[in-house]
Image: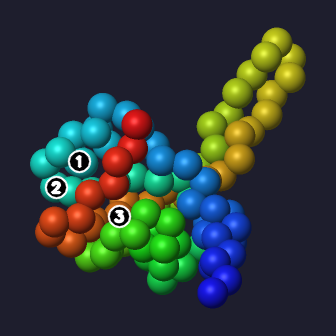
Amino acid sequence: MAEPDLSRYYRIIKKPLITEKSTALQDRENKYVFHVDYRANKVEIREAVERLFNVKVKAVNTMRRKGKFKRMGFQAGKGNDWKRAIVTLQEGHRIEIV
């Protein structure tokens, strides 16, 4: 039996966001925060997390974040806009993020 192609899921889930706030969410509410593709919708994010981490997802909340404005001397620029997803897992499921 052929293994499923996971590359499309890795394009949706870019990386986990590990901050003090996201770590507290993991411990208290079983929620995990990911940097995801800006064009991905909640259904795609749910499927990607379930396939990549072998868990059951209860809910997905997303936020679009504006890129920050930066200056270096006379040069001014803007960072890329990005999307954050907060994924709530069902009871008994956990993701090991180290």
Image x and y of residue 30, in percent: 21, 57
The colour scheme applied to this rendered structure is rainbow
Res 2 label: none
Task: Work out whether mark 2 precedes mark 3 in sequence or the reverse, and give the earlier one.
Answer: 2
Residue placed most toward the observer, 2 or 33: 2
Task: Work out whether mark 1 precedes mark 3 in sequence or the reverse, and give the earlier one.
Answer: 1
Dot 1 alpha-carbon crowd within 10 angstroms: few under 14, some 14 to 19, many 20 or more: some
Image x and y of residue 11, in percent: 68, 64
Residue placed most toward the observer, 39 or 73: 39
Label 2, on which residue?
Answer: 29
Residue at 82% over, 12% down: 73
Quick check: 60 left or right of 37?
Answer: left
Asked whether the residues under the numbered discs 2 and 3 touch, taking CB atoms below 8 Å apart as contact, a structural biologist would say: no
Residue at 74% over, 39% down: 78
Which residue type carries mark 1? Leu
The C terminus appears in which quarter of the rendering?
top left
The N terminus appears in which quarter of the rendering?
bottom right
Quick check: 26 left or right of 76?
Answer: left
